[in-house]
Amino acid sequence: MGIEELPKKMKAIQVVEYHKPYQINEIDVPRELRDDDLLVKIAVASNCHTDQMVQEGIMGTKLPCTGSHEGSGTVVAVGAAAAKRGFKEGMRVMCGIPYHPCMNCADCNNSDEGSKQYCMKLEGHKGVHIDGYFADYAVCDSRTSTPMPDEVTFRSAAPLACAGRTVWRAVLQAGEAAEKTGKWICIVGSGGGLGHLGVQFAKALGYKVIGVDAREEGLRLSKEYGADVIVDARKGKDAVVEEVHKVTNGEGADSTIVLSDHKDATAIGCAASKMHATLVQVAQPDDIIIPFPEIIFRDIRIHGSLICSPEQSKSMMETIAKHGIKVTTVPFEGLEKINDLTELVHSGKLAGKAIIIVDPQQIEDEKKLGAKY
């Protein structure tokens, strides 16, 4: 199907005013592709914490803007450069978030693959600065999008587009300074949308995992997805540290990832880590509070982490297909269900990731490929 055969209009969930609910609007189907672009018929779009930040005006988004930076679907049109890169119509993709990186800055040209997603001169991030994936069709950049293995489902790929890419890089960063096999990694916030993926990724790479969470559902998910040790953060910092030390010969975890934005989460993560350990900060509270002795006297090394690079994204997909990593999702059928989705998200009762099935037919069609994870 060529672009000229597509419908002229489509539905889109948009932020039209800060601090106000989403609106479902009818807008034009994108028809102009640049060389590196893909036009994707969206199968699934996912909700992320950043979507709330966009609605609150924290990201400085120019309105109106179609929401969601987590999308998956089928390519229906391909730019010339994207085609040379191997993308073609009918290909299933996990959509990219960065749109049109400059390809000239130090990060774009860094020999360190893990720096490429940090380009600050790009045109924007999908669903954050420019129209995203809460729509029937969307444009994305082929350079930051990832072809999907047959084993991976659209329902998993959409939340993996941000949550998966983010925690995958965090796990990679946590292990940069050490052999992973048999090492202890502590994940603070292990039972959330990112956390349950982090537990599985860490286990796939050979870690022993300590899952720390403060919710019954989070503790249950941490155990269900393979954490070797479960620690209830509601017992307080001292109790958490004591339990971590019991299983790590009194030293603490070899590395730690902080996914919780609770005010005490990073301090707990530092205290649960052994001397000279790496702590990867993913959560985005207004202030990150760390007692100075953790950095000065215990030499805990703090790394921030964003989404992963294009090549790291491919390795994540390969790991998911190989190890059968599963994404816990709560699906809502149709763009019209956005208010039901946001109500659940704000209730504090969400287990995993809330997603919208935009196109049920694509979900049916992928079963013929053997998609199961």
Image (tube, helix red, strand yellow):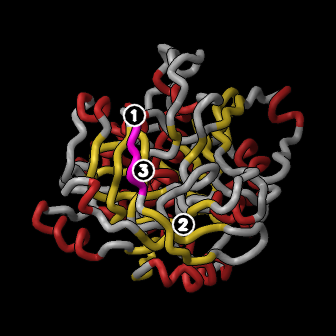
- Quadrant of residue 72 within the rendered picture: bottom left
In three-dimensional space, the C-alpha distance between marks 1 and 2, rounded to whole angstroms, equals 23 Å
Local crowd size for mark 3, using a 10 Å CA cut-off: few (<14), some (14–19), many (≥20): many
Contact? badges 3 and 2 (CB < 8 Å): no
Viewer can see residue 302: yes
- Residue labelled with disc 1: 143
Between tags 3 and 2, which lies in front? 3
Residue marked by disc 2:
47
Q: Amino acid at mark 1?
A: Arg
The C terminus is located in which quarter? bottom left
Answer above or below: position of 162 versus 308.
Answer: below
Could you tell me if the residues under marks 1 and 2 are in contact, i.e. CB atoms within 8 Å?
A: no
Return the disc, 3 or 2, that comes first in the chain's sequence: 2
Residue nearer the viewer, 78 or 345: 78
Query: Disc 3 marks which residue?
Result: 139
Looking at marks 1 and 2 on the same chain, the residue that comes earlier in the sequence is marked by 2
CA gap, disc 3 and disc 2: 18 Å
Residue drawn at x 28%, y 76% as measured from the top left: 360
